[in-house]
Amino acid sequence: MPEITEITNSDDEYQDAVSSENHTDMKITDIGNQDHNAAVIDEIIKEQADLHLNDEGDDNKEASASGVTDNNETIPEYLHDEIDEEALKENEKSMTPEELEANKEKAQKMKLEANELFKNNDAEKSIDIYTEALAICPTTYSKDRAVLYGNRAAAKIKIENKKSAIEDCTKAIELWPEYVRALLRRAKLYEHEDEFDEALADYKKVFELDPGQNEAREAMIRLPPIIDERNERLKAEMIDKLKDLGNMILKPFGLSTSNFQMQQDPNTGSYSINFNQNPS
């Protein structure tokens, strides 16, 4: 299962850190020379090492979802981070183009401020700033708003608020359907939440948009057998429950599900039921 490590890139978004085997494929611009780039990236990766989405037990997942960590520390739920897009659009109708542009510039500065907070391990404050930026960034700037949602999702990952991070990724993708980073981030989150069908769909979309995306290609090979195994397990569990129900219903008649044999047609996969008066 993939790990997620978020780093800050020069375009003020967060990019998933590459693994050691494909680290050389990473491109960094607008920072300086290559030696300086490497030093910056090494330092950021070191600082953000705690951003891994590691495999956790069910108890840990339930604790995270409820807002409580293993150490009984409360995780901020950010219940007031919802943005009323329709109200924002309505408010913008009374604003001049100059006022809208000013709000866009202000939101951009707030994004940069939040990025720095995130880099300095203050994810909670960065979430607040991203939310404030979303509250003023004009709705006509869809990609700018998508990046704000995507960055806020990255910050929420750090505080283990994965469900809300998925929601923010979804909002980012709705605003910018070709936003590969948000799609890849959501795919990883879905996979870590065992929502394999949704994860596979996102990985496929990533690969469609960027055929060179190795993580997506690998996931498209890895996930189908996992999904098939899960479906077979669920089917077996369902059949066992149906048998228990059937035995309860048939018992007054001196019968049980053992009197009925299910045979699967290897060509169609459908089942037929045969009655056996004296089962062995």
Image (cartoon, helix red, strand yellow):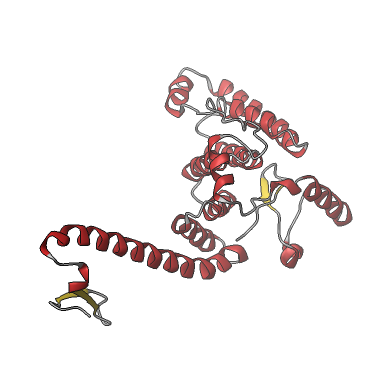
Among the 4 quarters of the image, the one containing residue 217: bottom right
As displayed, is residue 136 above or below residue 158? above
Residue 206 location, x and y as percent?
53, 59
Which quadrant, please, contains the C terminus? bottom left
Which quadrant, please, contains the N terminus? bottom right
Most foreground residue, 174 or 217:
217
Question: Which residue is painted at 20% across and 61% down in the image?
Answer: 246
Q: Report the side of 181 relative to 200 (left or right).
A: right
Please tell me how many numbered marks the rendered image carries.
0
Q: Is residue 8 visible?
A: no
Residue 91 location, x and y as percent?
47, 20
Question: Which residue is painted at 44% across and 58% down in the image?
Answer: 197
Residue 89 location, x and y as percent?
45, 26
Most foreground residue, 1 or 94:
1
Question: Which residue is painted at 81% across and 49% down in the image?
Answer: 46
As displayed, is residue 128 above or below residue 20? above
Q: Is residue 120 visible?
A: yes
Q: Report the side of 236 relative to 79 (left or right).
A: left
Residue 175 location, x and y as percent?
49, 41
Q: Report the side of 247 relative to 179 (left or right).
A: left
Question: Which residue is painted at 72% across and 66% down in the image?
Answer: 22
As displayed, is residue 206 above or below residue 78? below
Among the 4 quarters of the image, the one containing residue 249: bottom left
